[in-house]
Amino acid sequence: METYTFMRHFADSWGLLAMTLFFLAVVAFTFRPGARKAADRAAEIPLKED
């Protein structure tokens, strides 16, 4: 099997699954219960004085 054909079939099947799982993990990490406090602290970083 040609390299291009193999990579194309891999991206069409397992690559799509991997990207979907990564997206769901990022969304779950963002909306976890303890994320609000960390997000609020990160949002205030540009406003803090040294």
Image (cartoon, rainbow, N blue to C red):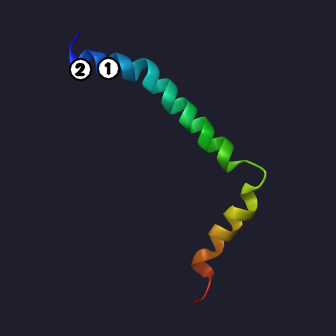
Say which mark, if any, is on residue 4. 2
32 horizontally vs 47: left or right:
right
| Residue 18, position as x, y percentages in the image | 50, 29
Q: Is residue 19 left or right of residue 34?
A: left
> Is there a contact, CB below 8 Å, between mark 1 and mark 2?
yes
Judged from the image, the secondary structure of the residue bearing numbered disc 1 is: helix
Residue bearing mark 1: 8
The residue at the point 43 percent across, 26 percent down is 15
**Residue at point 29% right, 16% down?**
6
Residue at 51% over, 24% down: 17
Q: Quadrant of residue 35?
A: bottom right
**Residue type pointed to by label 2:** Tyr
Q: Report the residue that reaches farthest toward the bottom.
A: 50
Coordinates of residue 31 in the picture (x, y in percent): 71, 48
Check disc 2: other Cα within 10 Å, few if <14, some if 14-19, many if 20+. Answer: few
Q: Residue furthest right?
A: 33
Measuring 40% from the left and 19% from the top, which residue is drawn there?
12
